[in-house]
């Protein structure tokens, strides 16, 4: 929401309600149009409590004879979303207050650093009164599905990384020579091999020919040329020779989990593609060279749809890629990104930038120019991620497919 619109709301006769969100209870404080705070009320985090809040709102509206109500809250963990969605469903305007602003405003309340739920609720209401809030933009429908699926995918990737590292540790202990043949601990051939023959003793007992025959019968199209060498490596391994029962169980269960996680990720990425096909702006974003299904899903899911925004700066701020500096007097501070936004969106744009700067990709020349000027790699990639964000926004806004010539024209204008 723009500043003029915020100011217009603040200057009207509005009933402002601050909510301090908790796990089991919420603290509610009403700020009347005349600047008087009502007595704090604690409501339960259930339907009974929300209905009680509706009754309180109705009573406060009658008391100050206004129909305009704003309820503000911090985005505390995941607990805030339930009351926010419920209130929006009742036709009540819900806004968000930055938790950092609440923390900094504590001493303005009573000149102490003390913290209570009642005090936090009053501070939230006071910040809203002065326009220090953000619009509550909760994704709906397909956008909500995209956002949740991308979050699930991130958690699965984290678990996959942990299991892959654990498998590497196990193999380094019992059969370190195996990585002469297999560079990655989660390569397809290695995982299928470990499913049947997790330890060097198992490989030696079976023999190279039996391993080939067994794996080719169960898993088609596997590369089996290296299995002759594998038997020799198993015979001469320097891996530990104790605890084989426990290592066998650990390797097999870890391999099973890695395969399961990979299957789940494949299914999720299929679901993401299906959801993107239902979003009008998705084809324009996907036309950008190097931008795949997952990146598009992260951008659209985290933003709730690019059509909801009027300026690219809003997206940069949402991602925490907006710039700031701390300067005073003769001191000139460094320009940095705020990192106050949605981390998954920021991470997705940064990873996308690492793809966009490769040779033959849209921002390769721009990245090379920044690096030749002496800019550090991370800073250069961050600068490119900002440009990628602007480009993606422009494609969705203009309903235009990507053309390789567009970034080149922009760079030529800058050079001129």
Image (cartoon, helix red, strand yellow):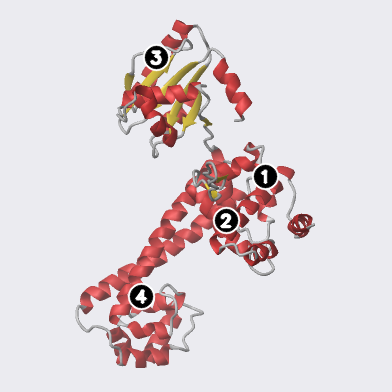
Q: Position of residue 16 (x, y in %)?
A: 47, 18
**144 displayed left or right of 408:** left
Residue drawn at the location 59% of the way across and 56% of the way down: 293
Q: In which quadrant is the C terminus drawn?
A: bottom right
Q: Are marks 3 and 4 in contact (CB under 8 Å)?
A: no
Q: Which mark is residue 37?
A: 3
What residue is shown at x 42% (from left), y 57% (from top)?
A: 156
At x 62%, y 42%, the residue is 313
**Mark 1 element type:** loop
Q: Is residue 2 above or below residue 258?
A: above
- Residue 152 picture location, percent across and down: 44, 51
| Front residue of this view, candidates 324 and 180 | 324
139 left or right of 405?
Answer: left
Residue visible at 40% across and 39% down? 78
- The spot of residue 352 in percent (x, y) is 58, 58
User: Do residues under tags 2 and 4 come within 8 Å of each other at their CB atoms?
Assistant: no
**Quarter of the figure with the N terminus:** top right
Q: Is residue 129 above or below residue 363?
A: above
Q: Is residue 334 visible?
A: yes
Mark found first going from the N terminus, 4 or 1? 4
Is residue 75 something that shows in the picture? no
- For marks 2 and 3, the one nearer the N-term is 3
The alpha-carbon separation of the residues under discs 4 and 1 comes to 44 Å
Q: CA distance from mark 1 to mark 2?
A: 28 Å
Which element carries disc 2, helix, strand or loop?
helix
Check disc 1 and report the residue beneath it.
280
Q: Which mark is residue 195?
A: 4
Q: Tell me which label, 1 or 3, sits earlier in the chain.
A: 3
Residue identified by numbered label 2 = 382
Front-lying residue, 104 or 38: 104
**Side (left or right) of 416 relative to 331:** right
């Amino acid at each position: 929401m723009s500043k003029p619109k915020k100011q217009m709301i603040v200057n009207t006769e509005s009933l402002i309600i601050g909510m301090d969100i908790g796990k089991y209870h919420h603290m509610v404080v009403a700020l009347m149009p005349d600047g008087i705070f009502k007595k704090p009320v604690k409501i339960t985090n259930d339907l009974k409590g929300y209905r009680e809040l509706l009754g309180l709102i109705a009573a406060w509206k009658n008391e100050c004879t206004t129909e305009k109500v704003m309820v503000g809250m911090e985005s505390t963990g995941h607990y805030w979303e339930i009351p926010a969605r419920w209130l929006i469903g009742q036709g009540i305007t819900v806004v968000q207050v930055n938790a950092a602003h609440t923390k900094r405003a504590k001493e303005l309340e009573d000149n102490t650093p003390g913290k209570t739920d009642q005090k936090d609720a009053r501070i939230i209401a006071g910040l809203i009164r002065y326009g220090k809030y953000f619009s509550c933009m909760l994704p709906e429908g397909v956008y909500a599905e995209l956002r949740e699926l991308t979050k699930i995918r991130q958690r699965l990737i984290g678990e996959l990384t942990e299991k892959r590292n654990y498998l590497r540790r196990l193999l380094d202990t019992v059969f370190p020579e195996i990585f002469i043949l297999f560079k990655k601990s989660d390569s397809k051939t290695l995982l299928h091999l470990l499913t049947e023959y997790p330890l060097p003793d198992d490989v030696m007992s079976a023999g190279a020919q039996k391993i080939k025959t067994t794996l080719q019968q169960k898993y088609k199209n596997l590369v089996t040329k290296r299995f002759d060498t594998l038997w020799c490596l198993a015979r001469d391994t320097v891996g530990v020779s104790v605890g084989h029962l426990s290592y066998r169980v650990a390797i097999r269960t870890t391999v099973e989990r890695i395969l399961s996680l990979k299957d789940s990720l494949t299914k999720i990425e299929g679901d993401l593609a299906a959801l993107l096909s239902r979003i009008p702006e998705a084809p324009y974003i996907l036309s950008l060279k190097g931008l795949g299904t997952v990146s598009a899903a992260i951008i659209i899911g985290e933003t709730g749809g690019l059509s909801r925004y009027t300026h690219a700066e809003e997206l940069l701020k949402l991602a925490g890629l907006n710039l700031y500096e701390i300067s005073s007097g003769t001191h000139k501070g460094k320009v940095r990104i705020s990192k106050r936004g949605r981390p998954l969106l920021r991470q997705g744009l940064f990873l996308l930038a690492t793809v966009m700067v490769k040779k033959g990709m849209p921002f390769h020349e721009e990245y090379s120019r920044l690096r030749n000027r002496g800019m550090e790699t991370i800073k250069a990639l961050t600068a490119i991620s900002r440009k990628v964000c602007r480009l993606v926004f422009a494609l969705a806004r203009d309903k235009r497919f990507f053309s390789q010539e567009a970034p080149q024209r922009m760079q030529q204008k800058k050079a001129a």
